[in-house]
Amino acid sequence: MFKRVRDLREDHDLTQTQVAKKLNCSQQVYSNYELGQRDIPTDILIKLSRLYEVSTDYILGISNDPKIH
């Protein structure tokens, strides 16, 4: 899951700071999400899903299909 979060950010040409701002958290907290040092709360997972227009299942690694159904 953590690699997908980083890959999605990089695919959208965003910095950690930019994403953290959209999520209303610090860059350090967001960095910890990407490194797997901190679990991603449900509300943040939903925000990431909306930001990148992918399903939460895709972010969680449950599905390889990024489309929202």
Image (cartoon, rainbow, N blue to C red):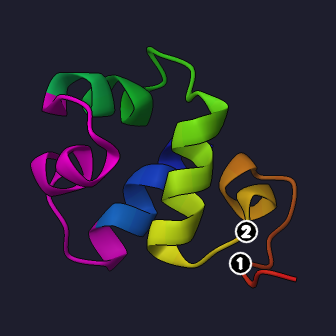
Q: Is residue 59 left or right of residue 9?
A: right
Q: Is residue 3 above or below residue 68?
A: above
Residue numbers of the magenta segment = 10-27
Circle 1: residue type: Pro
Tell me which corner region of the image, top left, top right, bottom left or bottom right, holds residue 25: top left
Tell me which corner region of the image, top left, top right, bottom left or bottom right, holds residue 51: bottom left
Evaluate if marks 2 and 1 touch, with contact meaning CB atoms under 8 Å apart: yes
Magenta highlight on residue 20: yes
Q: Is residue 64 above or below residue 15?
A: below
Q: Earlier in the sequence, mark 2 or mark 1?
A: 2
Q: Position of residue 48 (x, y in %)?
A: 50, 56
Residue lying at 33% horizontally and 63% vertically, measured from the top left: 9
Dot label at residue 17: none
Circle 2: residue type: Ser
Q: Position of residue 26 (x, y in %)?
A: 18, 28
Q: Is residue 37 above or below residue 17?
A: above
- How many C-alpha atoms fall within 10 Å of the one at disc 1: few (<14), some, or many (≥20)? some
Q: Position of residue 4 (x, y in %)?
A: 54, 55
**Is residue 59 visible to us here?**
yes
Badge 1 element: loop
Magenta highlight on residue 26: yes
User: What secondary structure prevails in the magenta region?
Assistant: helix
**Is residue 4 visible to us here?**
no
- In-front residue for pair 20/2: 20
Residue lying at 87% horizontally and 54% vertically, measured from the top left: 62
- In-front residue for pair 26/8: 26
Badge 2 element: loop
Residue lying at 59% horizontally and 38% vertically, measured from the top left: 43
Residue at the outermost top position = 37
Q: Which residue is mark 2?
A: 55
Q: Which residue is mark 1?
A: 66
Q: Is residue 43 left or right of residue 11?
A: right
